[in-house]
Amino acid sequence: MSRRAHAVALVLLGLVAFGAAVATNRWLFPLYSLNRDDSVYVAMARLIEHGHVTLPAAGHEAFRPWASAIVGDRIVLKYTPPWPAVLAAAELLTGSVRVGLGVAAAAAAVLTALVAGEVLRDRTAGVVAGVLLVLSPVFLVQSGTYLPYVPQLAMELGAAFLLLSGVRRRSTGRVVAAGALLAVAGWARPFDALLFGLPFLVLVLLDARSARRGGTGGWTEVGTLLRLAAGAAPVVVLVLVYDALVVGSPLRLPYTVTGPQDGFGFGRRGVFPQSTISFNPVNGVDGLLANLRWLPSWTAGGIVLVALAVVGLFRTSGRARWAVAALAVVVPLGYLPFWGPYAMGRLWPGVRLFGFFYHLPVLVPLVTFGAAGLLALARATRSGRPPWLRPVTAAVVAAMVVLTALALPDKVAANLAVRDDYRALQRFVDDQHLGTAVLLLPYRGDLGFESTSPFLENDASLDQPVLYAEQRGARDLELVDGHPDRALYRLTQQLAPGRTTGGRLAIDRLRVTSGPTVTVHLRLTNPTDRPVAVTYADVAGGAISRVLDRSSAPGRSYDVSWTVAVPGADTPPPGDGVRLPAGSTSGVLSLGLRVEQAGAGAADLGRRWEQRIAYRLVDGGTRVELLLPGERWFREDGPGAPWVPDASAHAVTDIG
């Protein structure tokens, strides 16, 4: 392939990758993906657009992005600026953050072609490798999300190309640029940059050593390292200053603000301390195998490409091929002691929806040597000898097309189902016409990786008609003080068992009722055929109850009143009253209905429906404020049964 044809091919490859990424995002992920990290990178991009990288804790705590923590008086996001800065620049320059996705995808595709061409010493093979990358389902899906894996791969490929070509040409400028780009990749995702860069660094150092010993001249090992360091040094200084200003120490990574449990190693692992799993070496191997098992179906050509890559590797000469091939070993083994691949393979459908994204660099040797094997077969066929090669080549290409086509529908359908659930929730909220309001959202806050509405976002300025807040129990009352000009609402989403999107939806307008005593009126309806209906109140573990009916029937309703009194009230509440515990300043009061079988023993906890009502004491503890109606929850029988949100509002209804 001539230099001109190569340039044209690279431009076309970049344009196709750009268009595919933007189209995939518009089609599959218009409201983000099931991996809620999407929303965090965009949130940080929008923060950068405002000229900031953190938020003030005062006034923003209830509205903060989920993957963040309070450090001093600031809200710090756990991710770093490189990828969000690209998204911010895209929106500022073009008006669309999606352009950043296209740029990252185009860069990754073109740089794959350049690296493959450099390693194989074949421009045509390099372009074919880029095409195979773009056609791989894992690349198509990842490039359509705001997740960082494609831009990270692009930075790493850029560093590898500059390093390999710079050493070959004895270009100090290229090697210095390689060091700078690898340092930026390290700022974005340190461990990924280390795993990707290590094989190439070892390669150039071994080449320098061989050249020195052979007396052929060129750079020494030290000279190569100094050039890389010269490029990396300014970025490293920037990172140290950033960390010192943002998290208080130049040696502390922002990634650690959510806790040390989200890292490498075995033990209790998870994003936040309150949501961890036990992770051991057996789980690490299990996660590795689960991801590798899915690898063929997420690559263009499937198992045929894997076979071609093996052939291509051994038909390729030069030591550079071993640096690329090493990625297929170094990256999976490097991630073995990280809990993420295990979680996405076994605990949530991450690998089924998004592919082997932690191991995405493994795609580079597959498409590089797969292109070499495919071209070797095609060129042998073109020579006409032996004659049976032509039908074999046609069968190989057809098999690659068929395997890729067969692998796509399930992956697309699963992501479309999430998209449709998100759209249904968006329409439901829009149809409420909330006006100027604050909307409390379920599954937000620290455990926002379970969020059902990542697309309901706050501008960094908090200047928008509806603000979206996490539910914080008694602290929800602070929103009334902080935003007296806004109505307060609560969204309830009742998910089907095993689902993390969709379900039944409800929105309640909230009100604050206060006084030395406050009477709450409820209508309790028995939706079962169990005859014993009991109403109860529970605050700070002190539960009281009374039997409403021992011969109840399905659909029978009872009007119940509970009077809530401050701890120091002069007169005790009546028999249907609840006195808040002494020393309490705020908390949550549960009022509900329990239905049981006749003659049930203590082991029968009954089916329960309840409202959890936030309260706080004001005016020196002489008055209580209640936020009504409370959150609705339901639990089936049995001591191990979980509480789940109840959007039906049938069993326990607030009647003012």
Image (cartoon, rainbow, N blue to C red):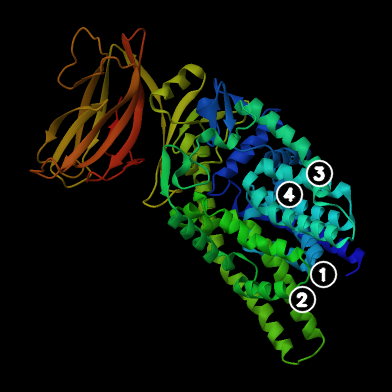
Q: Quadrant of the N terminus?
A: bottom right
Of the image marks 1 and 3, the number of the one nearer the N terminus: 1
Of the image marks 3 and 2, the number of the one nearer the N terminus: 3
Q: Which residue is mark 1?
A: 124
Q: Which residue is mark 4?
A: 155
Residue placed most toward the observer, 177 or 207: 207
Quadrant of res 395: bottom right
Q: Which residue is mark 2?
A: 375
User: What numbered label is drawn on residue 226?
Assistant: 3
The picture places residue 85, in percent across and down from the top left corner, at: 71, 38
Q: In terms of secondary structure, where does tag 1 sit? A: helix
> In the figure, is residue 285 to the left or right of 117?
left
Q: In terms of secondary structure, where does tag 2 sit? A: helix
**Residue located at (54% from left, 33% from top):** 257
Q: Residues within 10 Å of mark 4 (few under 14, many from 20)?
A: many
- Decide if residue 135 is in sight here: no
> In the figure, is residue 86 to the left or right of 334?
right
Q: State which mark lies toward you, 4 or 3.
A: 3
* Type of amino acid at the residue the image marks with label 1: Thr
Of the image marks 2 and 1, the number of the one nearer the N terminus: 1
